[in-house]
Image (spheres, rainbow, N blue to C red):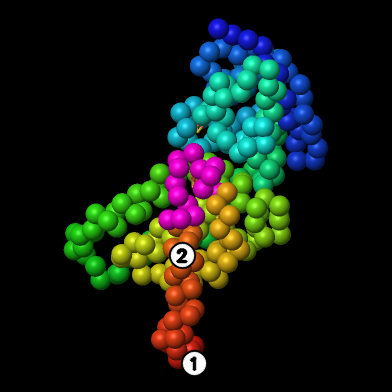
Amino acid sequence: MSYKANFKIWRGDDTSGELHDFIVEVNEGEVVLDIIHRLQATQAPDLAVRWNCKAGKCGSCSAEINGKPRLLCMTRMSVFTEEETVTVTPLRTFPVVRDLVTDVSYNYQKAREVPSFAPPKELGLGEYRMKQQDVERSQEFRKCIECFLCQNTCHVIRDHEENKENFSGPRFLMRVAELEMHPLDTEDRVREAQDEHGLGYCNITKCCTEVCPEHIKITDNALIPMKERVADRKYDPIVWLGNQLFRR
Ligand code: SF4
Ligand code: F3S
Ligand code: FES
């Protein structure tokens, strides 16, 4: 069964753009990315869109559909009524390259700023056996497909370009948390999270968690535990005294 749907697609570049109207065929079982491809094939051959796997695994096709950050390839047309106009716009938090493609290099920069896993130098290969519980903790974070929907949604940078320098966003604070929870890591991740990645900017609104297509509990399992560790360190009198002595 097929029908004709009304689409509005944002077209433009980093200087200007506007919504363009299209009427396009929709067939049973299709996702929004299928419709974008049909538009490219029939009406707008130069429409720019980024995608790769069409299976919700590469994280490339992130955009906003009717104002909600989503993966184009995982959004079924059946979630909209046949009469509904479907509006597709680029991610709002990052600069537009063209049409639906944004420049997400902010995220690559933030990824580079997280120092890599640092096990004790003296530890030989196979000398440590990790507990299953520790494996499982980081396993959840490793489901991340780097779609950056969480980064796009977090109000700390969505509405405040000026915060980008000091805030790494939920995806990379989660990476810092993953390293902090690794029993062998020797870096001071609690200090890093607070001083270098802007953990204090996060006020636990959980919008990042709501949009994560991998259903990672970013706020509950990564951000809140990190905040608790920062608070423990700040308010524990012994730790405080230790910090004071260390500074001298
Ligand atoms: Fe995407 Fe979830 Fe990873 Fe954020 S944490 S980049 S929303 S998969
Ligand atoms: Fe932003 Fe997520 Fe915190 S949306 S404010 S990082 S809970
Ligand atoms: Fe890979 Fe959508 S095309 S996640």
Using the image as rendered, state which of residue 114 and residue 240 is in the foreground.
Answer: 240
Would you identify the image quadrant in which residue 242 lies? bottom left
Q: Which residue is mark 1?
A: 248
Q: Position of residue 136 (x, y in %)?
A: 31, 51
In this picture, is 85 found above or below 207?
Answer: above
Image position of 106 (left or right of 29): right
Image position of 161 (left or right of 116): right
**Quick one: quadrant of the N terminus?**
top right
> Mark 2, mark 1: which one is toward the viewer?
2
Mark 2 or mark 1, earlier in chain: 2
Would you identify the image quadrant in which residue 202 lies? bottom right
Q: How many marks?
A: 2
Image position of 25 (left or right of 117): right
What's the residue type where badge 1 is placed?
Answer: Arg
Say which residue appears at 49% left-offset and 59% top-offset. 223
Image: magenta residue range: 208-221
Q: Which residue is mark 2?
A: 226
